[in-house]
Amino acid sequence: MKQTVMPTRLAEFGAGIVNLPYWGISGRLALSALLIFFEIVTWGANPNLARADAPARAFSSQDKGSSLIRTAEAKVSQGLVLLRRGSPDELRQAFRLFGEAAKAKNPDAEFNLGTMYLNGQSVPVSEKDAFYWFGRAAEDGHVLAQYNFANMLESGAGGTKNEAEAAKWFKKAADGGFAVASNNLAALYLEGRGVPKDEKVAAAYFKKAASQNYAPAMHSLGRMYLDGDGVPRDPKQALSLLSAAAELGDENSRYDAAYMYFEGNGVPMNHRQALGLFELAARKGHAPSQYMVGYMYAKGLGTEKDVNKVVYWMKAAAAQGVPKAVRFLEQAAKQ
């Protein structure tokens, strides 16, 4: 019952475009502090969405010397206050201030104009205009904009699909310390999209993101150690990474760790241990784990058989479209 788990892409977790204002004027925190404030949101047909809504350190390299730049920064700061208030009139004023600051090539202003077009704040939603402003901010060294620009290039949002260019901008954002960009660049190398397929390079970028405690990258890297793809097969290292990612809330990782115990893959087979991990993920709504809990109660693996729990967990998995759970319930209904 070997399970094939594809490398975790950010898109699969509903996170990608950073689409709320960038708080880049004052009170800047370390990059590691920024990453814990990303939340999942939804935008259009593109699932690659996330937002940063906490103060963060500058993600641009703009010189702070001239009075023109200082004036632009003041306008961005004022614009952010208005944007947070959010009335229609205040949004229009914020957009105007960001536009004025963008004339001085202020990357924070350019980034915020992109987010306003992305969200339709005081202007109609426009992927094309968001793409333009993220591109300008990216050229001016804004790491979050570089990441957003890469995401839009990868997906074609904004009208231009170019995976090779996406890889270039993901690399710039990764070099700027953004873990999610490292993860997405790794996936491009793993899949050979926009860059030559290279599992070793993919593993290196997954390691970079994993070192920043980015759970999806830890999951993908754990799978690579488990399967020996791009790195020497090392089940112990795989289990360590999967367990660490599970502690960060990645239920795909918890499922894979459970499956190692279920199969005895690199660890002693232990159905009781496997069931405990599957149940933890199942309670969090992880559909494949729900099926496995039902299956193990049906077979009496690691536990006594329990028809009520079988039905409960199979129904939960079937409600999320797990084919095996659907078939199980259909067959049970015929008996």
Image (spheres, helix red, strand yellow):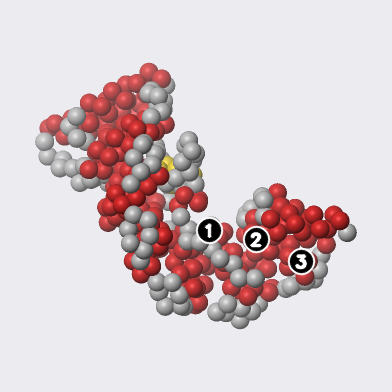
Q: Which of 277 and 233 is in front in this view?
A: 233
The mark found on residue 297 in the picture is 3
- The image position of residue 100, as x and y in percent, is 22, 26
- Residue 150 vertical position relative to residue 205 in the rendered view, above or below: above
- The N terminus is located in which quarter? bottom right
Residue placed farthest to the bottom in the image? Answer: 268
Q: Comparing marks 1 and 2, which lies closer to the viewer?
A: 2
Q: Residue at x 38, y 42 (%)?
A: 156
In 3D space, how far apart are the residues under numbered discs 1 and 2 (Cα atoms)? 12 Å
State the residue position of label 1: 250
Does residue 246 appear left or right of residue 33 in this picture? right
Mark count: 3
Amino acid of disc 2: Ser
Q: Which amino acid does label 3 sit on?
A: Tyr
Which sits earlier in the primary sequence, circle 1 or circle 3?
Answer: 1
Do the CB atoms of the residues marked 1 and 3 lie less than 8 Å apart? no
Q: Residue at x 28, y 23 (%)?
A: 96
Would you name the residue on which mark 2 appears? 289
Q: Residue 45: image x %, image y %?
A: 48, 38
Q: Where is residue 12 in the image (x, y as percent from the top left)?
A: 50, 51
Is residue 311 shown to the viewer in this render? no
Local packing at callout 1 (Cα closer than 10 Å; few below 14, some 14-19, many 20+) is many
Q: Under tag 1, what secondary structure?
A: loop
Q: Quadrant of the C terminus?
A: bottom right
Amino acid marked by disc 1:
Asp
Query: Earlier along the polypeptide chain: callout 1 or callout 2?
Result: 1
For this orientation, the residue located farthest to the right is: 335
Residue sitting at the far top: 89
Cα distance in 3D space between marks 3 and 2: 12 Å
**Which element type, helix, strand or loop, lies under badge 2?**
helix
